[in-house]
Image: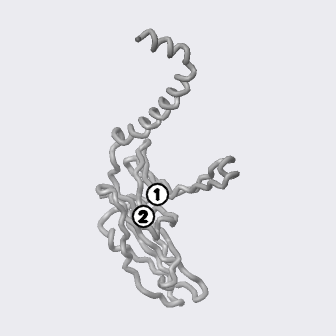
Amino acid sequence: MALAVGRFLRDHAFLVAATALPLVVVGFFLLATAIPRFTVPPPAYDLLFHTTAFDQAAPRMNVDLTVRDGQLFATLRPASDTSYPSRVHLWHFDHRTLTVREVPLDLPDRLAEDDGPQTIPVGAFAGRRVLAQPQAPDGYDLRSPTHRGPGIIGELFGMHRSDRTLSIAHRGRVIAIELPSPHAYQSPTMLGWLND
């Protein structure tokens, strides 16, 4: 019996190699993506970022979120009657639960047009230090959604692909961040990492 199997393998070596090689390659890639999940430690810092969306009911002011001296501030500027300011949404990614939630901004409803810019601290994070750097001290960084082309063949046959997954990543370990559906297609702007 062993002689027959050996003879079959020898006679059909090309067929065996053509079948086994793709399986080995797929197994290698599956292993390469699974290893970081067990060898790279989970994130140790929360993440703050914001998105903007057009909203006709938005207050008549422009809001800019910035980090200065480790604190998060909102700078408010009155909007002219001919402009349509976007509504700013502040997001907090919790590294312990791996969930994201919107943080309400306690801002005035309106500014007069003759008022100058006003800078106020964001009260939700008053006692926490924000590290305004692209990479957390533990090595994780934010990966924004990107549009990737499908290549020449895909362009010819109309296969357009966009990657809308927001995530943080470190040494091959990728953790997806799921935004609620109306905000999933908005481009995030990173503010910083929260240092406990």
| Res 166 label | 1
Circle 1 sits in a helix, a strand or a loop, which is it? strand
Name the residue: 29% across, 55% down: 96
Is 66 drawn above or below residue 148 in the view shown? below
Image quadrant where residue 159 sits: bottom right
Circle 2 sits in a helix, a strand or a loop, which is it? loop
| Res 157 label | none
Along the viewing direction, whichever of 96 and 14 lies nearer the viewer: 14
Determine the CA span between mark 1 and mark 2: 8 Å
CB under 8 Å between discs 1 and 2: yes
In the rendered image, residue 142, in percent from the top left (x then y), is placed at 46, 54
Q: Earlier in the sequence, mark 1 or mark 2?
A: 1
| Res 179 label | 2
Is 59 drawn above or below residue 128 in the view shown? below
Q: What amino acid is found at the position of numbered circle 1 in the picture? A: Leu
Quadrant of image for the C terminus? bottom left
